[in-house]
Amino acid sequence: MQDAIEFVEADVTALQFADASFDLCVTYNGLHCLPDPRAALGELVRVLRPGGTLRGTSRVTGRGPRQDALIAMSRRAGVFGNAPHTGQIEHWLKEFGLDGVRVEPSGAVEFFEARLPFPKQAD
């Protein structure tokens, strides 16, 4: 038997899913298009189960004048939103309590992966 896949259109800053619903959340080439990429990451973390993984990519500013100019041009054209600045994604992931945070830059793109830890057991 194969797992069923259901596609759902949703607002990434207000997902209609319950807390801790998913083992894996991905966001590839989308955060930089949003007005509030931090809020989107926060919402993806909210629906992530303990032990779950968040993976993605985003364009970022601060990786060079030519790259920043292309991002600015894309914003003026209405294609990009508030692209994060280099280092912000890593900061946000840690701020939201994820661990094992890995961020790899490639030009004006940051690839990232992090895990939501299991709650600590009381002694």
Image (tube, helix red, strand yellow):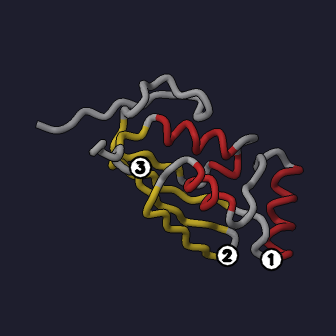
Q: Amino acid at mark 1?
A: Gly
Label 2 element class: loop
Compared to residue 16, the image places residue 44 above or below, namely below
Label 1 element class: loop
Residue at the image position 56 percent from the left and 56 percent from the top: 94
- Relative horizontal placement of residue 112, taking residue 68 as reference (left or right): left
Q: Amino acid at mark 3?
A: Leu
Query: How many neighbours does mark 1 have within 10 angstroms: few (below 14), some (14-19), or many (20 or more)?
Result: few
Numbered circle sitting on residue 30: none
| Earlier-in-chain disc, 1 versus 3 | 1
Residue that lies at the very extreme toward the left in this rendered image: 1
Label 3 element class: loop
State how far apart marks 1 and 3 are (Cα): 32 Å
Residue beneath disc 3: 116
Closer to us: 5 or 21? 21
Q: Quadrant of residue 2?
A: top left
Query: How many neighbours does mark 2 have within 10 angstroms: few (below 14), some (14-19), or many (20 or more)?
Result: few
Residue at the image position 66 percent from the left and 45 percent from the top: 38
Quadrant in which the C terminus appears: top left
Front: mark 2 or 3: 3
State how far apart marks 2 and 1 are (Cα): 8 Å
State how far apart marks 2 and 3 are (Cα): 27 Å
Residue beneath disc 1: 64
Residue beneath disc 2: 107
Residue 3, given in percent of the width and then of the height, sits at 21, 37
Contact? badges 2 and 1 (CB < 8 Å): yes
Compared to residue 60, the image places residue 10 above or below, namely above
Residue 26, given in percent of the width and then of the height, sits at 46, 49
- Relative horizontal placement of residue 5, taking residue 15 as reference (left or right): left
Query: How many neighbours does mark 3 have within 10 angstroms: few (below 14), some (14-19), or many (20 or more)?
Result: many
Q: Amino acid at mark 2?
A: Gly
